[in-house]
Image (spheres, rainbow, N blue to C red):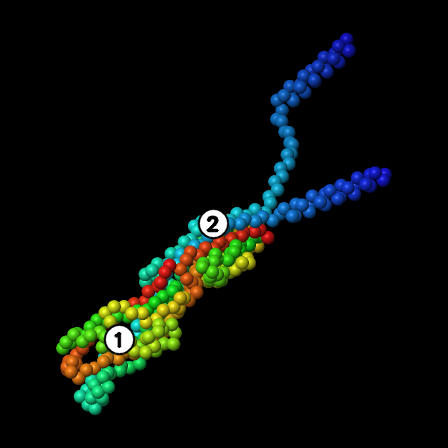
Amino acid sequence: MRRSIKVFFLSVLFISSFGFLKIQAAQDMDEEVSTVTLVITPACKLDIVDSKVSKTISPDTDARASFTEGFIEFDASKPTLIVDSNNKWKLSVRSTDFSGPYSKEAADLMLKDLSSLHVKSGFSDYVSLSNMDQDIAMYTGGVKDEEHPLQYKILLDWEKDVPGVYEATITYTLSTIGS
Amino acid sequence: MKTAKAIFVFLILFSGIFIASIFAATNNTDTAALSMEIPSICKLTVQNTDQSINLLQDASGEAAYEAGYVDGAIDRPVLTVDSNTSWKLSVKVSSNWNSVNGYQKSTGDLMFKAASGNGRQTGFIDFKPLALNDQEIASSSDGIGSGVYNCQYRILLSWEKDKPGVYNIIIVYTLSTQ
């Protein structure tokens, strides 16, 4: 009799365990993977606001004052350069000689960068331009919408700068450095 | 004589019964038992699993940075769900982006969206950042056959942070019965 009871309980335990295992195995799962690769190459973007500037020297006292001082200054922040880069970068500038009554030298055109960010020494004040690239600003990291407000100044000479229209083309180059 | 007559009658009757049993229509019924146990089963298929995006040094690369993101191709990947019971489809990234020259791109810069017409979608209807933990894309209390989810990745970009390099990440899709 006692043996029968023992067998009965062992059977119940076995059946319960089997049922439990069945419940544990009831869930199914499937897993898959996907990969994403993003390749970023060095990139930069240069925008110029107010790229064309012009000044007319009228034959009045201001004009005389300008010639007497030896220069005329253009409006501040015209043009303004906007720099974007995802890498180390530099900003450079060069100019043609002036076209007009005579070939006024590019060096008579001066430029300064009014920005407080990453301006290369020298261009915090006026620097004469040349036909060769000169670095205005430089930085070792990426930047977004970094503004470089500029200002021009043209040297004047009573003897050389005869009346006429003088034009020069200034080229700004933003380039990334390294890989 | 009486005994012989009785035997003769018995033989006639027995023969009649025997012949009748041969020509009578048989009607034999029996039963067989059939049992099939169906477990919870689900299947996830991923097509167009791998996605490579190249940012070019042209206007398209600049435009992507200006927009603040670049989109992967449409329908990369495509998920197909089959399940014979209630189920849940989820997504996570297995680990962070690889480091590029010491820079660790944020996991959430990888965004994901899915589109489906089967009415079981519960998340990622629009682009949403992925994370290291599972997030639900779709679920249902019923089974489904060939439930298709057309997916797309988007990667956020920053001029200041995302320096040149190759960035990799692995995304894990999990379909589980409930």
Is residue A9 left or right of B159 when viewed as pictured?
Answer: right
- Establish if A35 lies above or below A83: above
The residue lying furthest to the right in this view is: A1
Coordinates of residue B160 in the picture (x, y in percent) = 42, 67
Circle 2 chain: B
Res B31 seen here: yes
Judge whether A8 appears above or below B50 on screen.
Answer: above
Q: Amino acid at mark 1?
A: Ser
Q: Residue at x 46, y 61 (%)?
A: B103
User: Which residue of the protein is positioned furthest toward the top in this rendering?
Assistant: B1
Q: Chain under label 1?
A: A
Residue at x 60%, y 49% (from the top left corner): A27
| Quadrant (top left/top right/bottom left/bottom right) for the C terminus of chain A | bottom left
Instruction: Out of A47 and A5, give the one closest to the viewer.
Output: A47
Measured as percent of width and height from the top left, residue A110 is found at 26, 77
Q: Position of residue A42 (x, y in %)?
A: 37, 61
Mark number, residue B26: none
What residue did someone put label 2 on? B46
Residue A137 in the image: x percent, y percent? Answer: 34, 71
Give the residue at mark 1: A128
Task: Report the mark closest to the observer, 1 or 2.
Answer: 1
Q: Would you say B120 lies left or right of A51 here?
A: right
The residue drawn where x is 23% and y is 79% is A154
Distance (Cα) linking label 1 and label 2? 63 Å
Left or right position of A101 against B108 = left
Looking at the picture, which amino acid does disc 2 mark? Answer: Val
Element type at mark 1: strand
Pick the front one: B22 or B125: B125
Tell if the residue under mark 1 belongs to the same chain as the one under mark 2.
no
Left or right position of A149 against A34:
left
Residue displayed at 44% across by 57% down: B167
Q: Quadrant of the N terminus of chain A?
A: top right
